[in-house]
Amino acid sequence: MIPGLPHAAHYMQLPREVLIGSDVAALVGETIGRLGFHGPALVVTGDTVISIAGAMALESLRKQGVKTETTSVQSSTTEEVARVEKRIRELDPDIVVGLGGGKDIDVAKLGSMRAGKSFVSVPTTASHDGIASPLVSMKGLERPYSYVAHSPIAIIADTSIIGKSPYRLIAAGCGDVVAKYTAVRDWKLAHRIKNEYYGDYAAELALMSSRVVMKNASSIRAMSDSGVRTLVEALISCGVAMSIAGTSRPCSGAEHLFSHSLAMIAPKPALHGEQCGVGTIMCAYLHGANWQLIKDFLQTIGAPTTAKELGIGPEYILKALAMAHSIRPERYTILGESGLTKDAALRVATITGVIEQ
Ligand SMILES: [Zn+2]
């Protein structure tokens, strides 16, 4: 929210340019030039990605005559954000480029916002919608879930680089997109029960992303260029849906609360999108919606649909289900205000086959 905004007014912060396709990482320099940034750039990136996409991006910045510094992200923690923010303040670049996986982009997003600089998102993986959204989540923040930082001014998603990332990350991205199926149902419910703001446009955009990804399951599974592109476009649309809504509501409901709970309690949590996918199966059941459709889709993709496939013990699944309503009490969902009883948690997890009877 921005200061001085009248009560009933709605604020949207959207990316200005989005480039998706093979070899677009070579257009980073040109894109920021077109956006009016000519001064120094700070590239915030992980050690492992610099050799893949970084070379292309750095070369394009060099060609553009942009003086560039690089800092490598070690972890997605508040300490790391503080270090990057300090680096940004010292260097005073015109623009920050977040290049890499979700962790690198989250650190660039939050660090740049705190230092008052614009940032460009150059994702090298498609494992969740944070690559395009104004939201960040990381360990050490006061809340275990994501919250609004700022939108990237541009998104440059190179599908040839993303298509070379491990398939597990692509499958996880599908889980994060299909989660919108229940997230939007929760948002509608909160509108009816709590009179919470609800935006049809943002909701439809998020739902459309999940529909399109479900329709293209086999081409995503085959990692075809068009399949990867479909997933990346869906993740970007989800990010835009959140930018339009000004909240993560269209993209994050009870299935996300379940995933955040697992991240807090499981000895070895799975990937965010993997956990959200399994959460979506169970939350679809709770909504009386077609949970089998979600399960079939995730099986086609090759994403986990059971506790065993997540590598998480059934006791943690049940505990996460029972505590999910409590970690963000103001976010009303199908879990209600008091959450699932132990018996109800066991029932939903066994009926949907997430845990064995
Ligand atoms: Zn998510």
Image (cartoon, grey):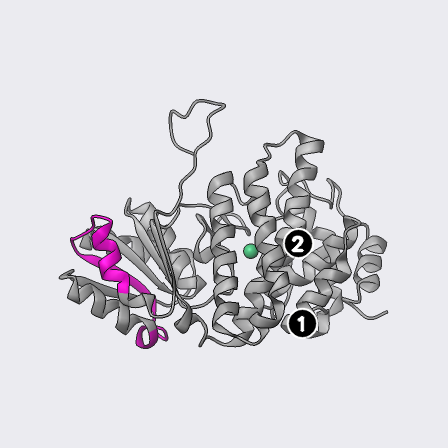
Q: CA distance from mark 1 to mark 2?
A: 20 Å
Which residue range is magenta in the image? 27-52
**Which amino acid type is marked by label 2?**
Glu
Report which quarter residue 131 is drawn in. Answer: bottom left
Quarter of the image where ligand 1 sits = bottom right
Is residue 165 placed above or below 75 in the rendered structure? below
Please rate how many residues cluster around mark 2, counting C-alpha atoms within 10 Å: few if below 14, some from 14 to 19, many from 20. Answer: many
- Do labels 1 and 2 touch, CB within 8 Å? no
Quarter that holds the C terminus:
bottom right
Residue 260 shows up from this direction: no
Which of 274 and 57 lies nearest the eye of the viewer? Answer: 57
Residue 61 shows up from this direction: yes
- Residue 148 lies in magenta, yes or no? no
Which of 45 and 227 lies nearest the eye of the viewer? Answer: 227
Please rate how many residues cluster around mark 1, counting C-alpha atoms within 10 Å: few if below 14, some from 14 to 19, many from 20. Answer: some
Residue placed under numbered mark 1 in the picture: 300
**Which amino acid type is marked by label 1?**
Thr
Q: Residue at x 43, y 48 (%)?
A: 134
Q: Secondary structure at mark 2?
A: helix
> From the viewer's perspective, is 93 left or right of 116?
left
Residue placed under numbered mark 2 in the picture: 255
Instruction: Kindly give the residue lying farthest to the left in the view shown.
Output: 65
Mark nearer the viewer, 1 or 2 = 1
Report which quarter residue 261 is drawn in. Answer: bottom right
Q: Residue at x 72, y 67 (%)?
A: 296
Q: Position of residue 349 (x, y in %)?
A: 79, 61
Which of 177 and 68 lies nearest the eye of the viewer? Answer: 177
Q: Residue at x 84, y 58 (%)?
A: 347
Q: Residue at x 34, y 76 (%)?
A: 52
Q: Is mark 2 within 8 Å of ligand 1?
A: no
> From the viewer's perspective, is 246 left or right of 327?
left
